[in-house]
Image: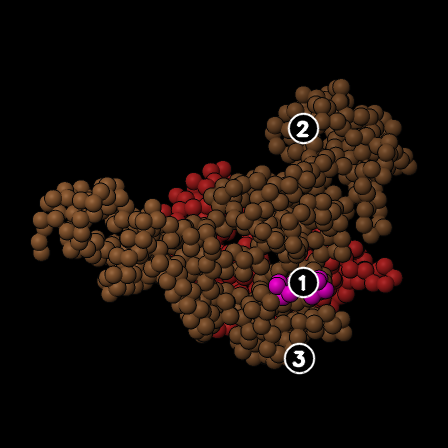
Chain colours: A brown, B red
């Protein structure tokens, strides 16, 4: 083999000009291929790690009530953060997603903006800080000013918006927005900084201190919005982390432990919600006997069912107004609400005596707005077991949506959710690969297009290669005859030509890769002013972003070598098949 | 003297009672159908007028709005039945679930403005530091009115605070100011004209003035009110789709 390699290498060097010219064309093709792949890889990296990551995180935990996507609220912040903390392997950073659209009035001008809460108190790595500053470079003021409690709602605005609204640092702007409950609200912001944004899609952003924005949006200190998780290795870990968090977010039964009062009588009770659908009502009907025949309102939206035993203890009946009270988990308050009993029931081998059932339409508003104490604080209180026939009609703390793997499935899931109009809070765990699998498809499509274009280019190059090889074989026919005459086998002759082409292609590929890196370096140093161009979202600080990978480059080289091999095989085989005597007789 | 005594008696009523009175006067007990015209004027955008037909049945929280003008909005509509609220787009022939704070036809009117909502369930009178509600007898132009403030009892409202001016004679709202939680005046509504329908009152001319962004306003005019019983199939998607053709 080394002898064949030696011959091949010698033949390459022997015809320098031809080898160099062919080598240059191959190198050029490799350069285009590597550059194009790096470009498409860079675009998807920008989309995923610089746009989607800020918008949705690598993994996002969304929680919303009333089927309103703007009503992102989880009522027990510490509980959710505990769950995330237990499943934090591979998680680099956890951010709360707080933002809202707003109408803003500046100095004689108005516009629409997106208010985003920025948590400047959280520690960030130097890498995160660098990436952030590349996208949101401060040109006047500082991000630190957002923490200044002495200023009314400090805010950082983009240069574009500052120009549109005719405002500068220290100016006050008024905003109109909807809080998480859909209420129209107004507030004043003080401009403490101006930032330059390179991505046109982010130019309408105003950063406000995270705590201030939460307060403006109507969150209590123990409540939170959705979460965006940034991972160390998203491609490897995103799905696993999402699956783990999802498993740990399984809800329990929604339960209120408190007391019921009618006139002067007081009784400890457990309060549960029941589903408002026909199947649940039918199940209830089969599991209890009603003291008086129920009418359409008994199990309706304002349905309040008392067990007969409880009703007897309280001295209440259908139509009585009872008071339900319980201690809140937060705020040290006690909630008291009055309800009209719509029916008395006698459970058959299920539930317990001191139970009140509320239709989910009235249960959930009570439960969420005044979260009850942890059930574990009442060790003696009744908890239905899963085997209890009534368990399936009782509502849970929230609805956990199933995990999906693709954007299409994710869209279907959201569509079904909107149609269902659940009263419960809805929790969803997604990775950005599901939310934005179209971006992956976009990258694949881009790779396919560049590959197709480069293959066309290579086809042209390979025509030259084939021609060159045929010329070489023709010129060296007598040489082939000599080699065969002195005992070289057909296979060796064929391999000699193949090795020659493979060596040429290999060295040309190395040169092509070097040229590609040089070209990428040169192009990435060019600055493009694309402030008003949507394509600016693909740039990083005004520069084209290339991301070559070892696997990508290796794949390209192996592909080119494979193509060269196939191209050279048939002429080389024909050359090897020449008879020695005929070859020796050949004369040009 | 009798009227003065009656007025005095009502002046001593609670805000909750006044809200109940407003609700009673304006709750439709029968179905209704009317033509509704929205005229919206926005600074830098000019004036936009939308004509629509409005069907309403309070007994099951249903209403249907279908746009009949201008051409760009014609055939589009909104259907609400119970908890379900859809928007229909004629050009795509699709229904989309929306929420009650969705804008109607791109105007500042929202779906929630057309539904029946019980004021006493949503709002409660504002009390001063001594726990006392204040109902002031004053004049709105030449009309004697009661003026009082309310605050939201629940989160699911458009504005957390409101001030009402209601006629002392018939307890109909004549003016309403809507405030944010920070007490910023956001909207002023004037109910300039009422008509009666089956013993109930319907405001046929409303003026909404955007107090946050000066210069924006919307006028809503209701005409051709009919109170005949409406067919059940009116409050269906199929009917809206057919109307839109």
Circle 2 residue? A392
The span shown in magenta is A116-129
Whether tag 3 and tag 2 are in contact, CB under 8 A, the answer is no
Between B139 and A234, the one nearer to me in the picture = A234
The location of residue A300, given as percent across then percent down, is: 66, 34
- Work out which residue is located at the far right of the displayed protein and give it: A264
Question: Disc 1 is attached to a residue of which chain?
Answer: A
Distance (Cα) linking label 3 and label 1: 27 Å
Quarter holding residue A191: bottom right
- Same chain under badges 3 and 1? The reply is yes
Say the numbered circle drawn on residue A124.
Answer: 1
Whether tag 3 and tag 1 are in contact, CB under 8 A, the answer is no
The location of residue B9, given as percent across then percent down, is: 80, 57
Question: In this picture, is A125 found above or below A142?
Answer: above
Distance (Cα) linking label 3 and label 2: 58 Å
The location of residue A309, given as percent across then percent down, is: 83, 25
Q: Quadrant of the C terminus of chain A?
A: bottom left
> Who's the residue at 64% across and 41% down the image?
A244
Say the numbered circle drawn on residue A170.
Answer: 3
Q: Residues within 10 Å of mark 2 (few under 14, many from 20)?
A: some
Between A243 and A101, the one nearer to me in the picture = A243
> Who's the residue at 74% across and 72% down the image?
A148
Question: Disc 2 is attached to a residue of which chain?
Answer: A
The answer to whether residue B159 is seen in the rendering is: no
Q: Is residue A175 covered in magenta?
A: no
What is the secondary structure assignment of the residue under circle 1? loop
What is the secondary structure assignment of the residue under circle 3? loop
């Amino acid at each position: 083999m080394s002898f064949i390699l030696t011959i091949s290498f010698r033949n390459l060097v022997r015809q320098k000009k031809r080898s160099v010219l062919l080598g240059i064309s191959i190198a050029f093709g490799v350069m285009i291929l590597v550059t194009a792949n790096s470009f498409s890889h860079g675009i998807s990296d920008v989309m995923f790690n610089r746009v989607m990551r800020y918008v949705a995180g690598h993994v996002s935990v969304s929680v919303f009530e009333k089927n309103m996507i703007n009503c992102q609220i989880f009522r027990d912040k510490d509980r959710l953060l505990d769950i995330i903390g237990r499943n934090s392997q591979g998680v680099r950073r956890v951010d709360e997603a707080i933002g809202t659209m707003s109408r803003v009035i500046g100095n004689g001008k108005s516009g629409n903006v997106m208010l985003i809460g920025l948590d400047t108190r959280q520690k960030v790595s130097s890498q995160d800080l660098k990436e952030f500053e590349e996208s949101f470079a401060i040109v006047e003021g500082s991000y630190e000013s957002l923490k200044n409690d002495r200023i009314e709602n400090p805010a950082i605005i983009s240069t574009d918006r500052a120009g549109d609204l005719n405002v500068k640092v220290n100016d006050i702007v008024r905003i109109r927005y909807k809080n998480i409950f859909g209420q129209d609200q107004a507030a004043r912001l003080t401009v403490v900084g101006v930032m330059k944004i390179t991505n046109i899609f982010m130019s309408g952003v105003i950063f406000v201190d995270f705590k201030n924005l939460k307060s403006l949006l109507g969150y209590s200190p123990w409540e939170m919005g959705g979460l965006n998780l940034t991972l160390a290795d998203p491609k490897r870990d995103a799905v696993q982390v999402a699956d783990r968090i999802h498993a740990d977010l399984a809800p329990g039964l929604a339960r209120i432990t408190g007391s019921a009062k009618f006139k002067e009588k007081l009784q400890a009770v457990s309060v549960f919600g029941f589903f408002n659908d026909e199947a649940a009502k039918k199940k209830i009907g089969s599991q209890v006997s009603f003291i008086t025949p129920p009418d359409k309102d008994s199990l309706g939206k304002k349905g309040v069912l008392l067990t007969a035993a409880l009703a007897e203890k309280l001295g209440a009946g259908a139509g009585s107004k009872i008071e339900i009270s319980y201690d809140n988990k937060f705020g040290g308050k006690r909630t008291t609400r009055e309800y009209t009993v719509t029916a008395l029931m006698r459970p058959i081998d299920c539930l317990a005596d001191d139970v009140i059932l509320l239709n989910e339409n009235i249960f959930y508003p009570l439960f969420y707005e005044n979260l009850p104490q942890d059930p574990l604080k009442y060790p003696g209180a009744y908890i239905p077991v899963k085997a209890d026939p009534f368990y399936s009609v009782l509502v849970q703390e929230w609805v956990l949506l199933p995990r999906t793997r693709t954007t299409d499935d994710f869209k279907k899931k959201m569509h079904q959710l909107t149609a269902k109009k659940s009263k419960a809070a809805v929790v969803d765990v997604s990775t950005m690969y599901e939310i934005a699998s179209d971006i992956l498809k976009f990258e694949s499509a881009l790779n396919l297009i560049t590959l197709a274009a480069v293959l066309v280019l290579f086809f042209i190059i390979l025509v030259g290669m084939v021609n060159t090889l045929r010329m070489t074989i023709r010129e060296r026919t007598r040489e082939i005859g000599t080699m065969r005459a002195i005992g070289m086998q057909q296979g060796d002759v064929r391999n000699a030509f193949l090795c020659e082409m493979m060596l040429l292609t290999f060295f040309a590929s190395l040169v092509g890769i070097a040229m590609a890196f040089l070209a990428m370096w040169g192009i990435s140093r060019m600055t493009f002013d694309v402030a008003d161009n949507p394509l600016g979202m693909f740039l990083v600080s005004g520069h084209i972003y290339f991301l070559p990978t070892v696997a990508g480059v290796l794949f390209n080289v192996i592909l080119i070598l494979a193509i060269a091999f196939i191209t050279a095989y048939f002429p080389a085989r024909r050359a090897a098949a020449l008879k020695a005597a005929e070859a020796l007789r050949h004369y040009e | 003297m009798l009227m003065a005594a009656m007025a005095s008696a009502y002046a001593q009523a609670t805000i909750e009672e006044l809200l109940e009175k407003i609700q009673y006067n304006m709750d439709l007990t029968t179905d209704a159908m009317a033509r509704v015209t929205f005229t919206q004027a926005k600074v830098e955008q000019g004036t936009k007028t939308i004509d629509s037909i409005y069907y309403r049945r309070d007994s099951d929280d249903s209403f249907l709005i279908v746009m009949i003008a201008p051409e760009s909005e014609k055939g589009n509509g909104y259907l609400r039945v119970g908890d379900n609220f859809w928007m229909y787009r004629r050009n795509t022939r699709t229904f989309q679930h929306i929420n009650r704070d969705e804008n109607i036809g791109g105007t500042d009117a929202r779906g929630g403005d057309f539904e029946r909502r019980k004021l006493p369930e949503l709002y409660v009178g504002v009390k001063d530091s001594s726990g006392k509600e204040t109902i002031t007898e004053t004049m709105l132009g030449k009309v004697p009115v009661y003026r009082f403030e309310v605050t939201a009892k629940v989160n699911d409202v458009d504005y957390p605070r409101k001030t009402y001016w209601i006629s002392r004679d018939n307890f109909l709202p004549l003016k309403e100011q809507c405030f944010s939680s920070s007490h910023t005046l956001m909207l002023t509504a004037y109910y300039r004209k009422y008509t009666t329908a089956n013993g109930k009152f319907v405001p046929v001319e409303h003026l909404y003035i955007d107090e946050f962004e000066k210069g924006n306003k919307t006028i809503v005019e209701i005409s051709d009110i009919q109170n005949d019983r409406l067919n059940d199939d009116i409050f269906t998607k199929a009917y809206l789709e057919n109307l839109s053709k």
